[in-house]
């Protein structure tokens, strides 16, 4: 009987990734496993077929030969539906499929299980000026560091970790029931692969101690809220000689009393007395580099925005500074004396004589309101 296409057997496309192949085989293996289907010859045949297909397609060299020559390219290397015994057969293929569930550990010298240290995050608050100009700052980081007394081994001075007798230093033990074989963490050494009989007193055998470290960090000019600076290897120390994690500095720029930032641009509001707004003149406008003079034309209204080119700030991604946008807010006088109020009434009378020429927006608004009510009444 002709063999079915291996991709068809696993139910995947020819472009399937290694993870997709593994997922498909695991699903079929669990469905057709002989232990779950006793005395079912068809299920056993499908199980062997899926096993053979996965053994070929999970091997890059075999898969390349199969893709080029079909079954003829792998006749000598495929499982061919043989028995389950022998090295590299059923237990090995299942170990590959289910190894991610039980944690295939990376191992260092002496068979010890190596753990990478955890990544850390530090929230750094900066003023707008600090964020724009950048600076060198000191960070106090509470973290785990490698124990200097035992050099991270966890064993007392003059001793060393001993190979676990239960797992032989592997850190895992294989449990077999019938044809089904899986690995699990060694109950004696808890996956370490070694036993510490004489622990270091400084770190209680952990190989790490809690300590606050002082780091000098250079903040680049132009950082913004949400920017993240990665310091490789400055996180928690690894275990059993594993590499340290990384430190991520998360930037938060504090609100400014004058400016609001929008990327490379700055925005601010300028209160303007109504006399200067009416007559025009010059006002002093603040920037991060000092004050500049802004010419205000006559008849300036609230909401008018003036743009000062190049008076914004650079960013990490845009080195050229943006612009400063100044929004005018005409300020109404308060706490007037009786004399001042009288002068304003006389001024109002004088302006009213000019009609629409002096207050065009007021006159236009009044006409629109009158037209609205006339339409309602008609």
Image: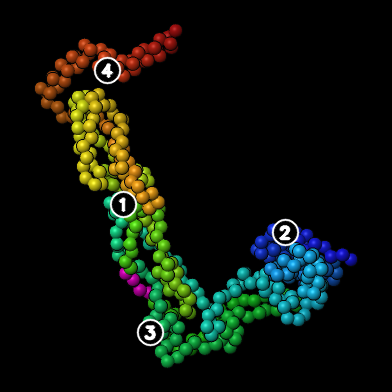
Q: Quadrant of residue 336?
A: top left
Residue at mark 2 to residue at mark 3: CA–CA distance: 55 Å
- Residue where numbered disc 2 is placed: 14
- Residue where numbered disc 3 is placed: 149
- Residue where numbered disc 1 is placed: 132
Residue at x 37% of width, y 46% of height: 263
Q: Residue furthest top?
A: 378
Tell me the element at label 3: loop
Closer to the chain start, of discs 2 and 3, is 2
Residue 306, horizontal then vertical, whole percent: 29, 34
Residue at mark 2 to residue at mark 4: CA–CA distance: 77 Å
Instruction: Give neighbour class at mark 1: few <14, some 14-19, many 20+ (Cα, 10 Å).
Output: many
Closer to the chain start, of discs 4 and 3, is 3
Q: Quadrant of residue 159?
A: bottom left
Tell me the element at label 4: loop
Relative placement, left or right, of 72 versus 236 is: right
Tell me the element at label 1: helix
Q: Nearer the viewer, mark 4 or mark 3?
A: 4
Q: Nearer the viewer, mark 2 or mark 4?
A: 2
Reply above or below: 357 against 50.
above
Q: Nearer the viewer, mark 4 or mark 1?
A: 1
Reply above or below: 337 against 363.
below
Closer to the chain start, of discs 2 and 4, is 2
- Residue where numbered disc 4 is placed: 359
Q: Nearer the viewer, mark 2 or mark 3?
A: 2
Residue 107, horizontal then vertical, whole percent: 55, 78
């Amino acid at each position: 009987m002709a063999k079915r296409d291996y991709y068809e057997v696993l139910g995947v496309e020819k472009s399937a990734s290694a993870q997709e192949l593994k997922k498909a085989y695991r699903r079929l293996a669990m469905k057709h496993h002989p232990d779950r289907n006793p005395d079912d010859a068809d299920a056993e045949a499908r199980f062997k077929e899926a096993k053979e297909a996965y053994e070929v397609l999970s091997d890059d060299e075999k898969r390349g030969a199969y893709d080029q020559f079909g079954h003829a390219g792998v006749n000598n290397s495929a499982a061919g539906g043989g028995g389950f015994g022998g090295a590299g057969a059923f237990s090995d293929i299942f170990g590959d499929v289910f190894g991610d569930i039980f944690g295939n550990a990376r191992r260092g010298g002496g068979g010890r299980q190596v753990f990478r240290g955890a990544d850390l995050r530090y929230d750094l608050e900066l003023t707008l000026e600090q964020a724009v100009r950048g600076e060198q700052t000191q960070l106090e980081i509470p973290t785990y560091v490698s124990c200097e007394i035992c050099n991270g081994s966890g064993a007392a001075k003059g001793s060393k970790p001993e190979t676990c007798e239960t797992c032989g230093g592997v850190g895992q033990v294989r449990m077999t029931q019938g044809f089904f074989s899986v690995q699990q963490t060694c109950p004696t050494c808890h996956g370490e692969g070694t036993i510490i009989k004489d622990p270091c007193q400084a770190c209680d055998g952990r190989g790490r101690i809690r300590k606050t470290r002082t780091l000098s960090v250079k903040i680049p000019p132009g950082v913004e809220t949400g920017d993240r600076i990665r310091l490789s290897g400055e996180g928690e120390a690894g275990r059993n000689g594993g590499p340290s994690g990384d430190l991520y500095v998360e930037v938060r720029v504090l609100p400014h009393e004058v400016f609001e930032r929008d990327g490379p641009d700055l925005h601010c509001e300028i209160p303007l007395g109504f006399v200067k707004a009416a007559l025009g003149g010059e006002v002093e406008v603040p920037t991060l580099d000092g004050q500049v003079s802004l010419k205000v034309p006559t008849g300036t209204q609230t909401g008018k925005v003036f743009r000062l080119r190049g008076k914004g700030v650079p960013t990490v991604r845009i080195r050229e500074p943006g612009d400063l946008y100044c929004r005018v807010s005409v300020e109404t006088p308060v706490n007037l004396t009786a004399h001042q109020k009288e002068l304003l009434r006389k001024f109002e009378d004088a302006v009213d004589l000019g009609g629409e020429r002096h207050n065009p927006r007021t006159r236009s608004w009044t006409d629109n309101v009158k037209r609205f009510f006339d339409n309602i009444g008609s």
